[in-house]
């Protein structure tokens, strides 16, 4: 397997971005590098996916953007998490635990599958 399908992980992009903004503001390229690094290269977020997530999250009040000079003197757009974003992150973490619990019932090592007995009463 070459990596994680964007279809599978799409619902978690916002959660990953919020996580990376919990401690400090950041900018797009740095966030994409951190996602790649923390996933050990198993997930590489596309630039268009990242910036559409920023737009949607800002519209929903989860993050806010601001402009700041970078070390190289160029103006860069940074993003920071809002209080609403922090609450959303906590909710998404709880949702993930439940999701993992449910999905793990259907993902088993090969050859170890055991289905519950079927109800034959009809």
Image: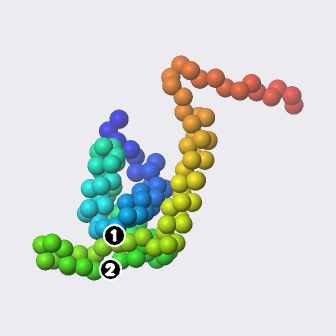
Residue 72's image quarter? bottom left
Residue closest to the far right: 122
Residue 42 located left or right of residue 89: left
Q: Is residue 48 above or below residue 100?
A: below
Q: Is residue 7 above or below residue 122?
A: below
* Local SS, label 1: loop
Q: Residues within 10 Å of mark 2 (few under 14, many from 20)?
A: few
Q: Which mark is residue 25?
A: 1
- In the rendered image, residue 38, in percent from the top left (x then y), is placed at 33, 48
Residue 50 located left or right of residue 82: left
Which quadrant does the N terminus fall into?
A: top left
Please report the residue visible at 38 percent of the width from the left and 44 percent of the height from the top. 4
**Mark 1 vs mark 2: in front:** 1
Q: Is residue 62 above or below residue 105?
A: below
- In the rendered image, residue 37, in percent from the top left (x then y), is placed at 28, 49
Which quadrant does the C terminus fall into?
A: top right
Please report the residue visible at 31 percent of the width from the left and 67 percent of the height from the top. 26
Q: Are marks 1 and 2 in contact (CB under 8 Å)?
A: yes
Please report the residue visible at 80 percent of the width from the left and 28 percent of the height from the top. 119
- In the rendered image, residue 91, in percent from the top left (x then y), is placed at 57, 60
- In the rendered image, residue 88, in percent from the top left (x then y), is placed at 53, 65
Q: Is residue 17 visible?
A: no
The residue singled out by tag 2 in the image is 66
Q: Residues within 10 Å of mark 1 (few under 14, many from 20)?
A: some
Q: Is residue 27 visible?
A: yes
* Local SS, label 2: strand
Q: Nearer the viewer, residue 117 or 32?
A: 32
The colouring scheme, among rainbow, by chain, secondary structure or one colour, is: rainbow
Task: Identify the mark nearer the N-term, 1 or 2.
Answer: 1
Please report the residue visible at 28 percent of the width from the left and 75 percent of the height from the top. 77
Q: Nearer the viewer, residue 114 or 19?
A: 19
């Amino acid at each position: 397997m070459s990596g994680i399908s964007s279809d599978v992980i799409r619902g978690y992009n916002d959660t990953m971005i919020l996580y990376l903004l919990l401690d400090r503001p950041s900018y797009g390229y740095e966030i994409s590098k951190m996602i790649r690094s923390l996933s050990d290269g198993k997930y590489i977020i596309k630039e268009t996916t990242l910036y559409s997530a920023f737009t949607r999250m800002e519209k929903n009040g989860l993050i806010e953007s601001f402009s700041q000079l970078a070390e190289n003197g160029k103006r860069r757009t940074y993003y920071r998490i809002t209080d609403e974003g922090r609450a959303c992150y906590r909710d998404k973490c709880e949702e993930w635990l439940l999701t993992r619990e449910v999905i793990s019932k259907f993902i088993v090592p090969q050859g170890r599958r055991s289905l519950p007995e079927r109800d034959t009463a009809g």
